């Protein structure tokens, strides 16, 4: 009788065991994280209601939350996206010394949040044989967020226009039942070339 209770307890713990994991990458961000961040920011920029800038010379400045090399890369990307949006409105990008207008992009969020949950047997490293993960149900959810607003000022520093703040987001979710995975995402809008 005691052996059956022990076996039933071990089975229940195995089936109901939970695990939270982090996907590793050999680069500072995974490709999925990069797509989440870039798609979220592109969507936020598209939602901005910029004034007509036809024929005006414009400089773009960035004000972002963050620090370090990853921050510098994000700032360069964000600035390029804002400059593209200014160009679509007819503005000509120049240095601040030559500009009639200065657009300050205030980026208060440009990051991802993610979480995963596992119901089943988590991977067990360090054991003699090593046991692979055996999922009954596994959920991986990642979301990219971007929040941006633009302030347009003339040479004298007077504000002439304001757009935002607006939020953009992007999602990537994977749901696995046993070893069968289902994806739900909105980051792959373009066709993927090179896959057979």
Image (cartoon, grey):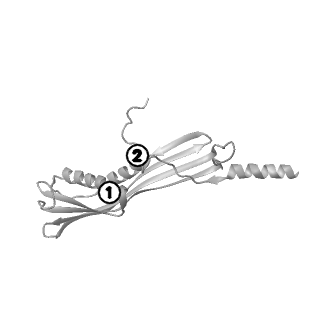
Q: Position of residue 7 (x, y in %)?
A: 80, 49
Camera-side residue of 138 and 32: 32
Q: Report how many numbered discs are placed on residues in the image.
A: 2
Q: Position of residue 146 (x, y in %)?
A: 37, 57
Judged from the image, the secondary structure of the residue bearing numbered disc 1 is helix
Residue at label 1? 72
Camera-side residue of 165 and 76: 76
Q: Position of residue 55 (x, y in %)?
A: 11, 54
Quick one: label 1, few (<14), some, or many (20+) residues within 10 Å? few
Which residue shows up at 64% across the image and 53% down it?
Answer: 18
Q: Which mark is residue 187?
A: 2
- The residue at the far right in this view is 1
Residue 121 shown left or right of residue 50 in the figure: right
Residue 4 shown left or right of residue 193 in the figure: right
- Using the rendered view, name the quadrant where residue 168 is placed: bottom left
- Using the rendered view, name the quadrant where residue 96 is placed: bottom left
Which residue shows up at 16% across the image and 70% down it?
Answer: 158
Q: Which mark is residue 15?
A: none
Residue 131 shown left or right of residue 114 in the figure: right
Q: Quadrant of the C terminus?
A: top left
Q: Position of residue 12 (x, y in %)?
A: 73, 51
- The residue at the far top in this view is 196
Q: Earlier in the sequence, mark 1 or mark 2?
A: 1
């Amino acid at each position: 009788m005691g052996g059956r209770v022990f076996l039933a307890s071990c089975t229940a713990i195995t089936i109901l065991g939970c695990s939270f994991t982090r996907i590793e990458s050999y680069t500072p961000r995974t490709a999925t994280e990069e797509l989440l961040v870039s798609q979220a920011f592109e969507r936020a920029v598209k939602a901005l209601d910029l004034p007509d800038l036809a024929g005006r010379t414009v400089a773009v400045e960035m004000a972002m939350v963050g620090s370090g090399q990853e921050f510098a890369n994000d700032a360069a990307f964000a600035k390029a996206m804002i400059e593209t949006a200014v160009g679509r409105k007819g503005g000509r990008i120049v240095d601040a010394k030559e500009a009639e207008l200065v657009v300050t992009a205030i980026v208060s969020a440009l990051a991802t949040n993610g979480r995963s949950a596992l119901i089943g047997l988590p991977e067990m490293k360090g054991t003699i044989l090593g046991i692979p993960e055996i999922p009954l149900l596994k959920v991986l959810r990642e979301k990219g967020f971007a929040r941006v607003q633009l302030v347009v000022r003339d040479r004298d520093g007077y504000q002439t226009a304001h757009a935002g703040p607006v939020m953009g987001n992007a999602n990537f979710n994977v749901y696995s039942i046993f070893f069968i995975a289902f994806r739900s995402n909105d980051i792959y809008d373009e066709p993927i070339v090179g896959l057979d």
